[in-house]
Image (tube, rainbow, N blue to C red):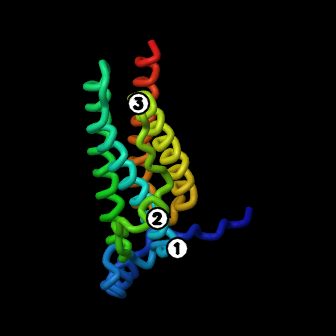
Amino acid sequence: MAKAAPAQPFLTDVKTLRARARKHIEDGAVTAGYQADRATVIKLLNEALATELVCILRYKRHYFMASGINADAVAQEFLQHATEEQGHADLIAARIVQLKGEPDFNPEGLAMRSHAEYVEGDSLVDMIKEDLVAERIAIESYGEMIRYIGDKDISTRRMLEGILAMEEEHADDLSSLLEGLAR
């Protein structure tokens, strides 16, 4: 029976890891093991940042403009979502900086960079529907980004997976609100 070739070691030897870590230290968290196209990831993250910022603005408007018999509970949901979207924006901006990019907070062109639209809505039901549409867009966008990044940038993928899970919760919350108002 032929002897199998020795398998490549699972981990890089310590001496090599230490030597690699000393090279290009100005790149901070981006090491030689980073496999994604950094420019593309930063571009995607800036689009995600714009999407989150537009969602924050829309949710805040809806929070202040909610009126009617069911407005208080729905407005609180809008406010909670706005706060959570702000957390997403902060995570994304921090990751862009870790990747040696610059987060794009420029309000000029914000709506064009965003995947979601800023639609005000005329009634409480319209507001909920527009927020649900935006959450569904975010779910699709984050899913595509996660699949694109795969194992090439594990930290960004994990961050996006966490954000995606919360966007799915938001969509579920909004869907439940719509069902409740329909009754």
Q: Residue at x 42, y 34 (%)?
A: 122
Tell whether 9 sits left or right of 155: right
Give the labeled residue for mark 1: 37
Number of other residues with Cα within 10 Å of mark 3, as a class: few under 14, some 14 to 19, many 20 or more:
some
Marks 1 and 2: in contact by CB < 8 Å? no
- Closer to us: mark 2 or mark 1? 1
Who comes first in sequence, dot 3 or dot 1? Answer: 1
Q: Considering the image in quadrants, where does the N terminus appear?
A: bottom right
Who comes first in sequence, dot 2 or dot 3? Answer: 3
Q: Nearer the viewer, residue 135 or 10?
A: 135
Q: Nearer the viewer, residue 34 or 167?
A: 167
At mark 2, the secondary structure is: loop
- Closer to us: mark 3 or mark 1? 3
Q: On screen, 150 above or below 140?
A: below
Which amino acid is tagged 2?
A: Asp
Q: Residue 163, position in %: x, y?
A: 39, 48
Which amino acid is tagged 1?
A: Asp
**Quarter of the figure with residue 13:** bottom left
Identify the residue at the far bottom of this view.
23
Q: On screen, 14 above or below 93?
A: below
At mark 1, the secondary structure is: loop
Q: Nearer the viewer, residue 22 or 153?
A: 153
Give the labeled residue for mark 3: 123
User: How far apart are the alpha carbons under marks 2 and 3?
Assistant: 42 Å
Q: Residue at x 34, y 52 (%)?
A: 88
Q: Residue 44, position in %: x, y?
A: 49, 64
Marks 3 and 2: in contact by CB < 8 Å? no
Q: Residue 78, position in %: x, y?
A: 31, 36
Tell whether 42 sits left or right of 80: right
Q: On screen, 92 above or below 103?
A: above
Q: Residue at x 45, y 59 (%)?
A: 111
Give the labeled residue for mark 2: 153
